[in-house]
Image (cartoon, helix red, strand yellow):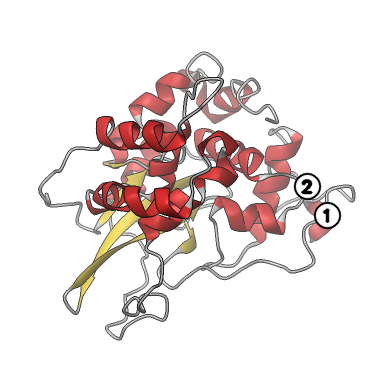
């Protein structure tokens, strides 16, 4: 089966796929996709074909975050994997969705990545994600990843700030800097932003030289703070699509090609799909987008 999708020169990690945290990870799209065949994904460039073939083989519940995929596919780094996932969303193979889960006085957001071996257009995805979707029921008992935070354990906001230096060396922060900025970053997460959205907002469009990372990050956290929106009735299935690029959530009909308006606009010149020409024409329009970073 592997020979149908993988080039011998593109080996995956021997560790195999990683399981996602409960409530996260890969989910197969609603029924109707074609059976596996050797010609799957042949219309995509090599990198996207390789990543798509690997994802297609993953079982439901496997980790689909960029870091886990990059570790399982060592040929490509995290930036390349992120670009490939964005391109696969535009090509119609995947969508990311978020669901709010309430229980025992707490609330958390879980992220699924819906995958379709058959490329689908925006209308199909909107209908599929707006109607009843096969989402596994949430357990009432506490999940292992979400116990009370032990004293001294870093928060998600702190970890996002601490990881900035790995994503962008110009924004390397000290432990004191992270502690100082943690309340601002936590406010982002409390307003529904994902850590990926937070990181993207802080690292995008940096000046060539950053002499004071603490001040720059503080300014961006303050100036780009997302609005606080009251909880609104969501779709019947409790799902909202999440931008594959920046993580911003929204209704399925508003995130065409799996991208929010600003991210779609930033890639418009290199990935202008011909919707009248169908999926094949749209994939052809991805050639410029799918460059290896």
The quadrant of the rendering that contains the N terminus is: bottom right
Q: Residue furthest bottom?
A: 141
Q: CA distance from mark 2 to mark 1?
A: 8 Å
Q: Residue furthest top?
A: 269
Rendered location of residue 273, percent (x, y): 50, 21
The image shows residue 64, relative to residue 93, as above or below, that is: below
Which residue is tagged 1? 11
Rendered location of residue 104, percent (x, y): 19, 79
Q: Quadrant of residue 255?
A: top left
The quadrant of the rendering that contains the C terminus is: top right
Q: Nearer the viewer, residue 176 or 33?
A: 176
Q: Secondary structure at mark 1?
A: loop
Q: Image point 51% across, 33% down: which residue?
A: 90
Q: Secondary structure at mark 2?
A: loop
Which residue is tagged 2? 75
In the rendered image, is residue 155 in sight?
A: yes
Q: Nearer the viewer, residue 174 or 129?
A: 174
Q: Residue furthest right?
A: 8
**Does label 2 or label 1 sit earlier along the sequence?**
1
Q: Which mark is residue 283?
A: none
- In this image, 208 relative to 144: left or right? right
- In this image, 84 relative to 135: left or right? right
Mark 2 touching mark 1, by CB under 8 A? yes
Q: Image point 26% across, 35% down: which residue?
A: 222
Rendered location of residue 288, percent (x, y): 64, 20
């Amino acid at each position: 089966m592997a020979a149908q999708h993988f080039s011998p020169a593109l080996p995956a990690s021997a560790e195999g796929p990683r399981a996602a945290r409960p409530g996260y990870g890969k989910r197969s799209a609603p029924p109707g996709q074609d059976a596996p065949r050797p010609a799957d994904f042949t219309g995509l460039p090599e990198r996207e074909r390789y990543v798509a073939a690997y994802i297609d083989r993953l079982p439901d519940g496997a980790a689909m975050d960029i870091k886990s995929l990059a570790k399982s596919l060592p040929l490509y780094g995290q930036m390349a994997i992120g670009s490939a996932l964005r391109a696969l969303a535009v090509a119609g193979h995947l969508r990311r969705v978020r669901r709010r889960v309430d229980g025992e006085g707490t609330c958390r957001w879980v992220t699924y990545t819906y995958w379709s071996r058959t490329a689908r257009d925006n209308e199909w995805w909107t209908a599929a994600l707006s109607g009843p979707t096969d989402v596994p029921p949430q357990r009432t008992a506490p999940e292992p990843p979400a116990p009370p935070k032990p004293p001294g354990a870093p928060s998600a906001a702190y970890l996002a700030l601490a990881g900035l230096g790995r994503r962008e060396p110009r924004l390397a922060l000290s432990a004191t800097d992270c502690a100082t900025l943690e309340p601002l970053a936590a406010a982002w997460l409390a307003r529904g932003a994902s850590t990926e959205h937070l990181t993207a907002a802080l690292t995008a469009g940096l000046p060539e030289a950053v002499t004071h990372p603490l001040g720059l990050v503080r300014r961006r956290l303050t100036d780009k703070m997302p609005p606080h929106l009251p909880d609104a009735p969501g779709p019947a299935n409790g799902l909202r699509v999440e931008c594959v690029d920046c993580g911003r959530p929204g209704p399925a009909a508003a995130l065409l090609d799996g991208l929010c308006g600003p991210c779609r606009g930033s890639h418009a010149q290199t990935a202008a799909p011909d919707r009248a020409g169908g999926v094949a024409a749209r994939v052809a329009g991805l050639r410029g987008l799918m460059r290896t970073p």
